[in-house]
Image: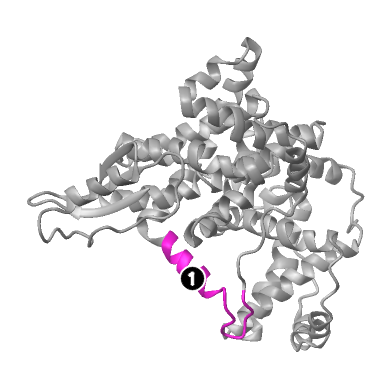
Amino acid sequence: MVAAPVVSSGTEPVLLDFETSVFKKEKVNLAGHDEDVDGRATDVALGWSVALGSPFTFATTLEQEYKSDIFGERGILLGAVHGIVESLFRRYTEHGMSEELAYKNTVECITGVISKTISTKGMKAVYESLSEEGKKDFLTAYSASYYPCMEILYECYEDVASGSEIRSVVLAGRRFYEKEGLPAFPMGKIDQTRMWKVGERVRASRPAGDLGPLYPFTAGVYVALMMAQIEVLRQKGHSYSEIINESLIESVDSLNPFMHARGVSFMVDNCSTTARLGSRKWAPRFDYNLTQQALVDEKEGLPAFPMGKIDQTRMWKVGERVRASRPAGDLGPLYPFTAGVYVALMMAQIEVLRQKGHSYSEIINESLIESVDSLNPFMHARGVSFMVDNCSTTARLGSRKWAPRFDYNLTQQALVDVDNGAPINQELVKKFFEDPVHEAVSVCAELRPTVDISVPADADFVRPELRQSSN
């Protein structure tokens, strides 16, 4: 795509998009923003379109272009498609499908036959090519996935439109370097987990030209995502040329072929820094929302999206059975690996707060006391929702937003290092044992009340819908 922001005499600002519909690298600014000094800017931009051999030329405003572009790459173009294949791969393998077949029925299905069909015949053709039984599976997946996808897309669009999303990109760029006593955090790898290693084996044995299977459930989820993104852009006032470009063309013709060729990182990390950061930020949100809502049993023309349930997945249903058979007073096992991860999280939060100038009383309260003495007992009593959803709306929304990011970062980086036999960071271990926070914690422990928190089933402080009698 070449984007040329211009103003024709006496008209509103115009941005011309020149779509190759095959390959998208960067936008090239052919004229000053909102300037047309000689009245020829539109003609020059059109000339570039012809010279580049672009088959499509679309007119839009600069504002609409940046909103749809930044939003689109966080949606179906990069972030959302990454999140849904992770979610579906996990679901399929949990239900007994082999890892190789699960990869084929998720990634290969989307980047191969679905992309080819949508590119040449459209979305309805995907549905029409299925058997009668397949059509039922498609509609089941479509119906369940549409609104969970739209919820995250809606939030993402408004973050982009408000400027919050670009601000987060700027701040992330600053964290690429050491500052304020905290280490540098460049972008980590996203394709070293088990799923993407399986993908390497699948691609290595894939016959030339093979487009993979057309798996109805995956098709239903993917088309639901695509239609949800189309609807958000439509309700936000974008033209169909822009909507189709950011929801279909760039996806099936430009970006999915990269993932088909060499996996998710080859697709995401061949894009701009803005896109790479956005994909990493939003992919976990799509994964979690699908897993927690679609895969378990109005404003501006868009529906309302109250907070969904977070405790209906397989893991938390297992938790119900565990708690039902737990002896009174049982505190569970002390599993070393879990302890190491949890204490590392605690120490990392302590260090961030310390370097940001907070006092030890505040640090220990927000990193230890409220966790182990106030909130964890709620999850111990009745699961994650009982802990999270007894808190404020601010806290409940924040927990839903950030939990997926911690999950993905641990899975993509920490657990990969462990599985690859990375050596223990002895300097980090030494700092842990010598950290002055331990002395401050011991002082707090001496002042700790002797009574533990009690979590009765119908306590007044429990949110009414979460009380035992209302379940």
Q: In the figure, residue 334 lies in which quadrant? A: bottom right
Query: Which residue is drawn at the image coordinates 61% and 84% (left, top)?
Result: 355
Q: Position of residue 104 (x, y in %)?
A: 71, 33
| Pick the front one: 457 or 69 | 69
Q: Position of residue 163 (x, y in %)?
A: 37, 61
Residue 267 spot, x, y in % from top left: 58, 49
- Please tell me which residue lies in front, 443 or 131: 131
Residue 414 placement, left or right of 306: right
The amino acid at mark 1 is: Leu
The question of residue 439 being in magenta is answered with: no
Q: Quadrant of the C terminus?
A: top right
Of 266 and 428, which appears nearest the observer? Answer: 266
Q: Name the residue carrying label 1.
A: 171
Q: As drawn, is 157 to the left or to the right of 321?
A: left
The x and y percentages for residue 431 are 79, 85
Q: Is residue 244 left or right of residue 82?
A: left
Residue name at image x 56 percent, y 56 percent: 281
Q: From where the camera sits, is residue 298 visible?
A: no
Q: Inspect this view and state whether residue 207 appears.
A: yes
The span shown in magenta is 165-184
